[in-house]
Amino acid sequence: MSKKHIEEVVRASLDAYFRDLKGTEPDNMHDMMVRVVEKPLLEVVMQHADHNQSRAAEWLGLNRNTLRKKLLDHKLIK
């Protein structure tokens, strides 16, 4: 899946979100999008990194401690 394809899927999902709002104005969209995208991103990257936090952090371009905090925030680790 290319970057362009992912962007198209996100764009289509956002268009559907606005249609579902039926004229109601959205609120805190940036925070919503970060929450909606970040958890599955972390889940998939951790799976492909064989749950190696150092490797996953490198792939994500994050500090390992930052990754760990995000994993805890999303209840993906204890």
Image: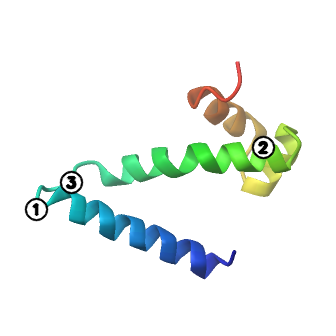
The location of residue 26, given as percent across then percent down, is 21, 54
Q: Tell me the residue at 59%/81% (across/down).
A: 4
Locate the C terminus and report the quarter of the image it occupies.
Answer: top right
Q: Kindly state the secondary structure of the residue where label 1 is placed.
A: loop
In this rendering, which labeled residue sits more in front, label 2 or label 1?
1
What is the spatial separation of the Cα atoms under label 1 and label 3, in whole angstroms?
9 Å
Judge left or right: residue 15 versus residue 13.
left
Three-letter residue code for mark 2: Met
Amino acid type, mark 1:
Gly
Residue 45 numbered tag: none
Residue position for label 2: 46
Q: Residue 8, percent across and down? A: 49, 77
Identify the residue at horizontal 58%, vertical 72% (top origin).
Answer: 6
Question: Which picture quadrant has residue 64?
Answer: top right
Which residue is pictured at 22% across the width and 65% down the height?
Answer: 19
Q: Considering only vertical position in the picture, is 33 above or below 3?
A: above
Q: Are marks 2 and 3 in contact (CB under 8 Å)?
A: no
Disc 3 packing (10 Å; few <14; some 14–19; many ≥20): few
Q: Nearer the viewer, mark 1 or mark 3?
A: 1
Q: Amino acid at mark 3?
A: Pro
Question: Label 3 belongs to which residue?
Answer: 26
From this view, report whether residue 74 is shown above or below residue 57: above
Provide the secondary structure element on which disc 3 rests. loop
Q: Which residue is mark 1?
A: 23
- Inter-mark Cα distance, 2 to 3: 31 Å
- The picture places residue 69, in percent across and down from the top left corner, at 64, 30
Q: For the residue carrying disc 2, how many other residues have a C-alpha within 10 Å: few (<14), some (14-19), or many (20+)?
A: many
